[in-house]
């Protein structure tokens, strides 16, 4: 940038969701004052002030700019974009810009092929508007997206004189359209692409092979937008490093060192099913000594989030779950911890409920029959303060018709100075061994705790050696929130466990590590699933089943969406069974 960007006040004129409700893509019109707003050229971008209490401004391509009127298109991907999507007419926010270097528009009546991946179309619309007057023939705009609701800008590209072609993931990729165009182009057109890095790499490879000049817009990588955080580094073949927000956002595709920008993945041959599978969501968890848990779906409600009363009241479709997982059951009734027990925090909540329940006897006589009636199978989560309590619970649950027990080892052992069972491989081994002896034929799942930290794999191995049939990870993460006005914690017992989307990626990494440890038993991934893609991450990391927790508190019917999306995901990869995707994450061949 050759000059310091200016700051302005902006007012929202409109903010509407494109492609129908649920697309997550929004168009926002802003009026800016003072009216002496700098001219914005194609390729440049502006930044918007963040939501209150957030830190980073967010960068956006400008779709259209006329005097003091700007238009943006963005996709909701985090807290700030969600905040922008909820702004109403006459809401105010700060705006800074323009940043970045313009894409040079040739005045030699050149033709362009514009390639957009998803919301990347927003980075090309202003270019199409300004360049259309210099084209010899009609420019071409190729747009690809996950589904039809994600296709944006098609009408505007047509308005600017472009021939528009679109494609969704069901039929292929936008680079497939580009390959068709380049075959008959003979290197005549300049290609400009904006979208995900892997798409840009493929575009660059196709253009090099066909002899077409290519520019790539790398705006996807930007964070702060002002050159401070250095997260948007672009590596060149000459050894130089540039940043998207200061030297970009467009770069000559020939200059980019793609092995460092978009590392290649090893090819993985997914299985091709040779016979029809009646239920593509069926998963069988194979335990030890021929014990098994046959699930009609890999989707489970995580323990602790749903009581039988809440399930009955909500009317959720329980048949889409592989099994119902109960709240924690203890030998004797427990009143639970003092209040307040819950407080909301960024990306989740902290809770310390204290295992409030009516005790094992009431559970077996009054609640368990209702669980068995509603769910295809039932998994009972059990907790105790001593090994003897776990043993007695296991003995009394045997023969009740349940499919499995989930042994919660996040509980403090009063005989070991209130040390959590799950932070010690020795205590875990003793607990699981005793529980296995008490219920020799029961399918036993051991639910690990994040409190184990770097010892979690050792704890998992100890559980398996003691007879566990399956490992579940994780549980809530130790957390604390403080009321700065009252000068005291927001939780009645001072500390609690954090759940929600904020812990999701931590749990995915641990599930991946447990998978790599080759424990010899299946894994259930739990933690921060807020949609089908979060659940799918656990599957790819190595989990055979997925627990959904806090998300069901937001909407108990979200399991339906996850189920439907999983079926589409299987079909997208041309598979017949969800199990073919377990552990199939393709790690990047990175070069240090």
Image: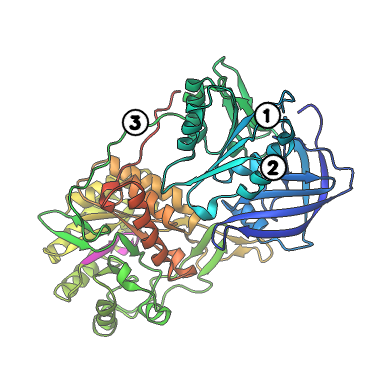
User: Which tag, 1 or 3, sits closer to the chain's start?
Assistant: 1
Residue picked out by circle 3:
266
Foreground: 272 or 310? 272
Which residues make up the magenta segment?
A: 404-414
Q: Quadrant of the C terminus?
A: top left
Relative vertical location of residue 66 with respect to residue 422 in this rendering, above or below = above
Task: Determine which residue is flagged by label 2.
Answer: 160
In this rendering, would 203 be left or right of 91? left
Q: Quadrant of residue 117?
A: top right
**Picture quadrant where residue 403 is located:** bottom left
What secondary structure is the stretch in magenta mostly built from? strand
Q: Closer to us: mark 2 or mark 1?
A: 1
> Which labelled disc corresponds to residue 136?
1
120 is higher (above) or lower (below) than 358: above
Secondary structure under badge 3? Answer: loop
Q: How is the image coloured?
A: rainbow
Mark 3 burial class by Cα count in 10 Å: few <14, some 14-19, many 20+: few
In this view, the residue in front, 238 or 276, is 276
Q: Regarding mark 1 in the picture, which secondary structure is present there? A: loop
Left or right placement of residue 15 versus residue 392 in this view: right
Front position in the image: 444 or 52:
52
For the residues labelled 3 and 2, the Cα–Cα distance comes to: 41 Å
Look at the image and say whether residue 132 sits in the magenta stretch: no
- Seen as rendered, the residue at the extreme top is 238
User: Can residue 435 be spotted in the picture?
Assistant: no
Give me the C-alpha separation between circle 1 and circle 3.
Answer: 42 Å
Position of residue 277 measured from the top left corner of the image (x, y, whole percent): 21, 56
Indicate left or right for 312 with 437 as reference: right
Label 1 vs label 3, nearer the camera:
1
């Amino acid at each position: 940038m050759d000059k310091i960007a200016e700051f302005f006040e902006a007012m929202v004129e409109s903010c509407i969701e494109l492609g129908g409700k649920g697309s997550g893509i929004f168009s926002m019109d802003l009026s800016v004052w003072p009216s002496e707003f700098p001219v914005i050229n194609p390729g440049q971008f502006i930044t918007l002030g963040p939501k209150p209490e957030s830190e980073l401004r967010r960068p956006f391509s400008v779709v259209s700019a006329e005097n003091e009127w700007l238009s943006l298109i963005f996709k909701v991907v985090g807290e700030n974009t969600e905040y922008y999507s909820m702004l109403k007419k006459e809401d105010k926010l700060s705006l800074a810009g323009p940043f970045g270097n313009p894409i040079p528009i040739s005045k030699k009546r050149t033709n362009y092929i514009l390639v957009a991946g998803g919301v990347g179309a927003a980075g090309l619309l202003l270019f199409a508007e300004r360049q259309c007057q210099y084209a010899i023939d009609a420019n071409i705009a190729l747009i690809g997206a996950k589904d039809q609701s994600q296709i944006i800008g098609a009408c505007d590209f047509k308005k600017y004189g472009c021939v528009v072609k679109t494609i969704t993931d069901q039929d292929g990729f936008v680079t497939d359209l580009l390959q068709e165009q380049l075959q008959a182009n003979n290197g005549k057109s300049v290609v400009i692409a904006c979208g995900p890095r892997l798409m840009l790499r493929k575009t660059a490879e196709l253009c090099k092979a066909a002899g077409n000049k290519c520019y790539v817009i790398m705006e996807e990588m930007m964070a702060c937008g002002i050159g401070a955080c250095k997260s948007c580094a672009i590596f060149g073949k000459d050894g130089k490093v540039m940043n998207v927000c200061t030297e970009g956002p467009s770069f000559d595709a020939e200059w980019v060192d793609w092995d460092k920008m978009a590392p290649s993945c090893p090819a993985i041959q997914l299985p091709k099913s040779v016979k029809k599978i009646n239920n593509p969501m069926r998963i069988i968890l194979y335990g030890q000594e021929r014990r098994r848990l046959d699930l009609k779906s890999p989707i489970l409600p995580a323990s602790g989030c749903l009581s039988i009363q809440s399930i009955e009241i909500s009317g959720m479709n329980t048949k889409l779950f592989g099994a119902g997982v109960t709240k924690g059951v203890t030998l004797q009734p427990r009143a639970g911890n003092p209040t307040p027990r819950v407080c909301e925090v960024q990306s989740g909540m902290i809770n310390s409920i204290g295992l409030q329940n009516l005790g094992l006897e009431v559970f077996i006589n009054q609640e368990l029959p209702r669980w068995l009636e509603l769910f295809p199978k039932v998994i009972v989560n059990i907790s105790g303060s001593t090994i003897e309590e776990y043993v007695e619970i296991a003995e009394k649950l045997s023969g009740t018709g349940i499919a499995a027990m989930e042994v919660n080892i996040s509980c403090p052992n009063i005989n070991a100075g209130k040390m959590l069972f799950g932070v010690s491989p020795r205590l875990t081994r003793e607990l699981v061994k005793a529980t296995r002896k008490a219920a020799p034929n029961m399918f036993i799942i051991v639910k690990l705790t994040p409190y184990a930290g770097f010892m979690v794999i050792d704890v998992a191995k100890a559980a398996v050696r003691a007879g566990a049939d399956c490992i579940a990870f994780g549980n809530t993460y130790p957390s604390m929130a403080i009321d700065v006005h009252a000068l005291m914690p927001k939780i009645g017992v001072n500390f609690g466990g954090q759940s929600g989307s904020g812990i999701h990626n931590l749990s995915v990494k641990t599930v991946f590590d447990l998978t790599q440890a080759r424990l010899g038993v299946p894994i259930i991934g739990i933690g921060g699933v807020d949609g089908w893609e979060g659940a799918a991450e656990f599957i790819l990391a190595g989990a055979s089943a997925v627990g959904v927790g806090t998300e069901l508190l937001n909407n108990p019917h979200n399991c339906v969406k996850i189920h439907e999306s999983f079926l589409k995901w299987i079909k997208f990869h041309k598979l017949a069974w969800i199990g073919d995707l377990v552990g199939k994450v393709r790690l990047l061949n990175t070069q240090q």
